[in-house]
Amino acid sequence: MSLTDLRRKIEEKSANLAVIGLGYVGFPVACEFARAGFDVVGVDLLPERAAKINAGISPIEGDEPGLQELAEQAIATGRLRAMLDYQALTDRDVFIICVETPVDDQHIPQYRALQAALRSLSKVMKPGALVIVESTIAPRTMDELVKPLLEEASGRKVNEGFTLGNCPERVMPGKLLANIRSLSRVVGGMSAETAETMAALYRHIVHGELDLADCITAELVKTVENAYRDVQIAFANEVALICERAGGDVWKVRELVNKSPGRNMLLPGAGVGGHCIPKDPWLLAYSVHGDDLPLRVIPAARAVNSAMPEHMAELLAEALGSAGAQLKGARVLVMGYAYLEDSDDTRNSPSQALVEKLIKSGAEVVIHDPYVEPYRSDLLESAQGCDAAVVMVRHQEYLRLNLRALRGALRRGILVDGRGAYTAERAGEADFVYRLVGVADHRL
Ligand code: SAJ
């Protein structure tokens, strides 16, 4: 099959697709292409996940508007089916790879899932198939790992026996379908014709702009956009630390700084969690790990953001000290375990780091989170007998909280605020010893 043939089949929707990896990236994509009228086979490692999908049930946790209905429709029309192996993929025109690409604790990318998927699909891939990697990868990975692995495992050459591209996703938990449909995407091809063919495919589900590029550009854009956000947040956090010592209030400083044209200082806080911001800077850095280019800004930003949970423990220890107590033996309520407000996603949550630090310091920890299963208790009940509360996530429930009721439940009135959830006035009226990240004591 030539690229021209494939392009025609895509445009008339007779091309058939395989989506490898049916998680929060792959499953919505598979459903969207099924809804657009394509025949889609999904492949996943987990039998229970494949069974759930074939029963018309979305396997994605959390509130994802429209996804469950889409799952039912995709299965009911027969356009989507989930499988556990690649045997049925010999007729597939397009393979879309959406497997995890984590980094280890040395910040080295772990491509086992990606390599396994590439090897397996190489064995069944028909001549002329198009392979698209959506997973986030370090720049240069398409050229130095994906292309050679496919060529070696299939015995064919790229742009001759198959075509290849990279189309990074911009999904966000809670808005999976909205983002796929509305956000622009970089469509990186190993050839210009491949990028155009990929765009013809994605145009069926993406209403945002499709920016044609080569693969290195697509890899760089994805990792840079998240590394950029990490650096922006780290700047806000470092200014918060300066304000605490210099006698300022970072929240006021940020508001006035952002009145200056072209400034957009982000929010300081208790740390940076999630599935992509803590990881993608390391993928970007890895792209030059073999070169003589010592990176300073990107690793430093990671260090600043990763240290914020520890800083919350320092603020707490100081507040306890002012009440004649210490972390050792204190009973501490950690408010919020998800990494993001009004989410149940706990991946890389700063709260995990804080809890470990508090336990290591000899404190007893009570965790509350209205969205995260094991911690969905009644907040005031959880607060009973605690010496202090630390706000780690701006869940709506906390913003609406009656602070006097919280004060009444606590043994000592210590409140450490890592997200600007409250103000010194509100906390003072409820008779709290209050510490807000980024604000010097005397201003509270
Ligand atoms: N955070 C701050 N200060 C800020 C913004 C975020 O401390 O000003 C913290 C959050 O509390 C959280 C972490 O950083 O712990 C990440 O928050 P996020 O708002 O970046 O949310 P994510 O992790 O879901 O990031 C996603 C990314 N989207 C994709 O990768 C497709 C990111 O590129 C988006 O910019 C971000 O959503 C967004 O704009 O919401």
Image (spheres, rainbow, N blue to C red):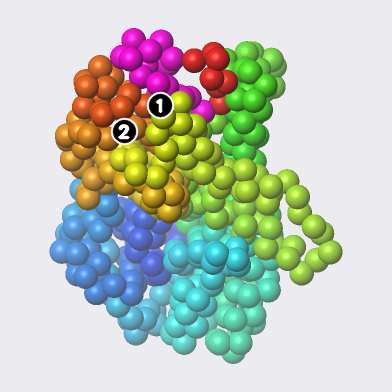
Indicate left or right for 311 with 351 as reference: right
Image quadrant in which you'd find residue 75: bottom left
Residue placed under numbered mark 2 in the picture = 387
Image quadrant in which you'd find residue 385: top left
Q: Is residue 18 visible?
A: yes
Residue 443 point in image, percent of width and height: 54, 13
Residue placed under numbered mark 1 in the picture = 323
Q: What type is the residue that disc 2 sits on?
A: Asp
Please give the range of residues in magenta: 418-437
Q: CA distance from mark 1 to mark 2?
A: 10 Å
Residue 149 point in image, percent of width and height: 60, 81
Indicate left or right for 155 with 113 as reference: right
Disc 1: CA contacts within 10 A as few (<14), some (14-19) or many (>=20): some
Q: Residue furthest right?
A: 292
Query: In front here: 34 or 406?
Result: 406
Q: Residue furthest front?
A: 324
Q: Residue furthest bottom?
A: 155
Q: Is residue 212 above or below residue 142?
A: above
Label 1 lies in ligand 1 vicinity (Cβ under 8 Å):
no
Query: In front here: 10 or 230?
Result: 230
Residue 279 point in image, percent of width and height: 55, 55
Residue at left offset 62%, top offset 17%: 248
Give the SS element for disc 1: loop
Q: Are marks 1 and 2 in contact (CB under 8 Å)?
A: yes
Mark closer to the observer (1, 2): 1
Residue at left offset 31%, top offset 14%: 430
Q: Is residue 256 magenta?
A: no
Image quadrant in which you'd find residue 295: bottom right
Q: Is residue 223 above or below residue 290?
A: above
Give the SS element for disc 2: loop
Residue 9 point in image, percent of width and height: 45, 65
